[in-house]
Image (tube, coloured by chain):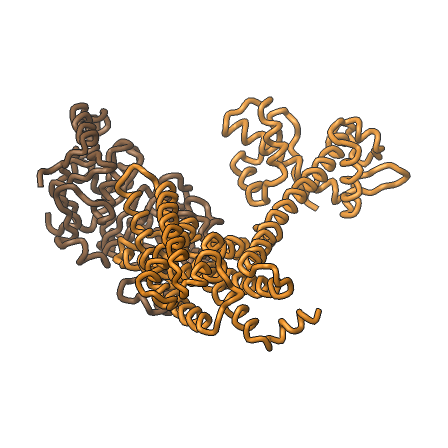
Amino acid sequence: MKDIAIETHNLTVSYNRRPVLWNIDFKLPVGQIIGIIGPNGSGKTTLLKAIMGLVKSSSGYVKIFDQELEDVRARISYVPQRESVDWDFPASVMDVVLMGRYRSHNLFKRIQQKDRDLAAEALEKVNMLEYSKRQINQLSGGQQQRVFIARSLAQGADLYIMDEPFVGVDAATEEAILKLFAEMKAEGKTVVVVHHDLQTAKDYFDWIVLLNTRMVAAGPKEEIFNQDLLQEAYGGKLDVLSKVGELVRERDFPIREK
Amino acid sequence: MNDTIRFLSFTDPNVRYVVLGTMILGATAAMVGCFSFLRKRALVGDAIAHSILPGVCLSFMISGEKDPLWLILGAIFSGWLSLLMIDGISRTTKLKSDAAIGIVLSVFFGFGILLLTTIQHSGNAAQAGLDKFLFGKAASLTKDDIMIFSGIGVFLILIILLLYKEFKLISFNPEYAKVIGLPVKFLEFLLATITILSVAVGIQAVGVVLMAALLITPASGARFWSDRLGIMIIIACVFGAASGFLGSYVSYIAPAMPTGPWVVMALSVLTIGSIWFAPKRGVFSKWRTFWKNKDQILTENILKLFYHLGEADGNFETARSFQSLMESDRFRAYDLGKGLRKLKKRNLIRKKDAQWFITASGLKEASRIIRLHRLWELYLNQRLKLEPDHVHNDAEAIEHIITPEIEAQLASELDSPTEDPHASKIPYPTQS
């Protein structure tokens, strides 16, 4: 693989003392639109959080653009799930998108005109510029999703990590996001998306990671969408693995000897 | 009256200190409390207020005197310890944060009372007035107190102004802040520190038990007036300052009244007033919307009745008596009378010789609603696959809110239909 966007090695992550990801190993290429799919509870969101350093891993590591996470944070952007935020917060659409311009090095500085221009440009890319003054509690689900995406675009990152951006969005938003994917790919950006729907995954993404608590497969979509692999990913949890995971939780056992 | 004039003239330095002190405390606590409110940590302020007591007492026992700076240091120390314990308990044990808050609050406060009682029995003369940390004695604020409050107040305002946008982000979406590399732990540490400072200083005016009010009530009330964070904070500060002023005023006029509780009373009146009367978001405003909707439904249903009667007769121009309208059994007499009067005012119907006629514009409006009703029935029948006898009640409600845009979309999606699922004709506006 030429340029690697994300590499994980032997990544094991626990949630509530229960391992939800076992020894995840993959390399994702730069410049592709990549979908992470798998049944509910397969650890997809946990994988995203481990990549971004929001949860601690019990073993293994993650490298981004072949560097440590802390050195490349400025190049990563995160589009969280809509429900992870209280939309009753007193803020306008523009307020939220401007958050993408905050940096650890401009903590005490005010927002500049350049920041506002970049934010407006990002809003225009998702067709939300006319809503820039609207309160976020007056937006539809799809509009909220687009605001989050605009915030990430305003950041000007190279790697975009999105958690289920297509859940419950209207047709206009779906179109806007797909159009954006095409533009971002043309600009050489990498987009990694946790996706909830197998059917549409075929059309939306170039690369697929099939996940079910363990890696089932990762590769270009033509290689992934075959019966055997899908059956393995969606055909139910590995029974023994689940039982062992339960044991680890019950006995509060360390997943790796230190 | 004389008292009021004397109060407002501020010639009495004691009045000046009390008013200034409570206003500064009220405003700064409100400002800091906005962030606790938005981060859904309202009760942590209460916990901090209770947890500060042992720190203050220990400080006194160690230093032997009532130096405000020492006491505040002690307050900050035990305030911080309690926050760390709350966090530690909720993270490492089965207990959730609400139980953790309750436990830490009571243990610290109990220990504090223990220490306070010990001090009071120790016979140390300097300890007189130490209990103002417990109950607040706004009425006895001195110039030194004001100096300290102002200093700390300015410091708090500065921190919030400098880091305003970061505090906003970590209140809204702390995970995102972490990913893009903001020092979230440091920012949260700073927010906690200024909350503790604000509490340490504020309880000297209103006491431990009422301190939570100073933090949370202004933010809660201000939230009803604005959807913009900046405006909300300013309104909260105004509420905080105003209640300080009013509380001082009341306790001046009626010397038996304690200042602290009256400050909180004033705050509560302002907030409860906001909950009731704030435009758009207040309870009263929601009631008005409810009644407006009811009126709209009533008048539109009456117009529909005229249309139905005209459709059945084959003649829309026929006069209708009040009796014949009541025979439809759709309205109570009081509502029908009220609705007819409203429609007459809008010239959608007219009255002649105790009979009612629908006007041309009334007929146009009635046709519109009928059209929306029948289009919606068709939509439910064809797109949601509902049976024709299941669509009427839905359409009865929805016909009142369909906008012209949705109407156009319905007509085009259903291919400009001429009949609804019950084979009734759908009236379209004739070209004029």
**Residue at screen point 28% across, 56% down:** B185
Give the number of callouts: 0
Q: Quadrant of the N terminus of chain B?
A: bottom right
Q: Residue furthest right?
A: B353
**Residue at screen point 33% across, 69% down:** A109
**Residue at screen point 78% across, 28% down:** B313
In which image quadrant can residue B65 be found?
Answer: bottom left
**Residue at screen point 9% across, 38% down:** A257
| Residue B221 appears in the picture as rendered | yes
Which chain is brown in the rendering?
Answer: A
Q: Residue furthest left?
A: A257
Q: Residue furthest bottom?
A: B11
| Residue A111 appears in the picture as rendered | no
The residue lying toward the viewer, choosing from A5 and A100, is A100
Q: Position of residue B103 (x, y in %)?
A: 36, 43
Which chain is orange in the rendering?
Answer: B
The residue lying toward the viewer, choosing from B185 and B47, is B47
The residue lying toward the viewer, choosing from A87 and B365, is A87
Q: Give above or below for B136 relative to B290.
A: below
Q: Position of residue A129 (x, y in %)?
A: 43, 57
Q: In the visual, does B412 lie left or right of A124?
A: right
The residue lying toward the viewer, choosing from B229 and B357, is B229
Q: Give above or below for A184 relative to A111.
A: above
Q: Position of residue B429 (x, y in %)?
A: 67, 41
Q: Position of residue B423 (x, y in %)?
A: 63, 25
Q: In the visual, does B170 lie left or right of A243?
A: right
